[in-house]
Image (cartoon, grey):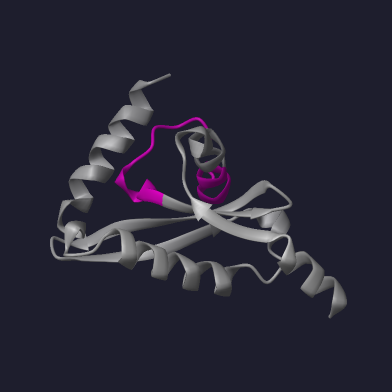
Amino acid sequence: METILAQQQNLSFRAVTISDINTIVKLYQQQKTTANSALTNQFGLPFYVAELDSKIVGYSYANATTENDYSLNTIVDVSFSKYSIHESFIRESELFFKKEWQKEHYKNLSASIFHLVNWLNNSN
């Protein structure tokens, strides 16, 4: 129990920055087993990262489910799956997303994802 508490104290969440994108793409490809292939809109819009001891161990992202709705998902590095990250991470992500994407801005989510994925696929 003490170990879990100590590890959680070193766990932090923050908004995604441009410098996080390479790590996020690698985590996505690791989970999807699509290394070195083009990203699709399923990549979503990453917006929040989980860090353990200043290392990104996961990220959360939004996907448009319909024109007027969205879903939030998380990807956590498989080597950190033994830590209790997922529940607190999704809860924090939901709060952050709702705060930042107020007033139904998620209606533009599909277009945002399309442009991000297109940019990532063509920026190599």
Q: Is residue 34 visible?
A: no
Taking the spot 49% from the left edge, 61% from the top edge, the residue there is 74
Residue 101 x, y percent position in the rendering: 27, 60
Q: Quadrant of the C terminus?
A: top left
Q: Does the magenta segment cover residue 122?
A: no
From the viewer's perspective, is 28 left or right of 56? left
Magenta residues? 27-46
Q: Is residue 114 visible?
A: yes
Q: How many marks?
A: 0
Q: Quadrant of the N terminus?
A: bottom right
Most distant residue in the top direction: 124
Taking the spot 56% from the left edge, 74% from the top edge, the residue there is 87
Quarter holding residue 11: bottom right
Residue 106 x, y percent position in the rendering: 21, 58
Q: Is residue 36 above or below residue 57?
A: above
Q: Does the magenta segment cover residue 30?
A: yes
From the viewer's perspective, is 111 left or right of 4? left
Residue 53 x, y percent position in the rendering: 74, 52
Residue 33 x, y percent position in the rendering: 54, 45
Q: Is residue 65 above or below residue 77?
A: below
Quarter holding residue 93: bottom left
From the viewer's perspective, is 67 left or right of 22? left
Most distant residue in the bottom direction: 1
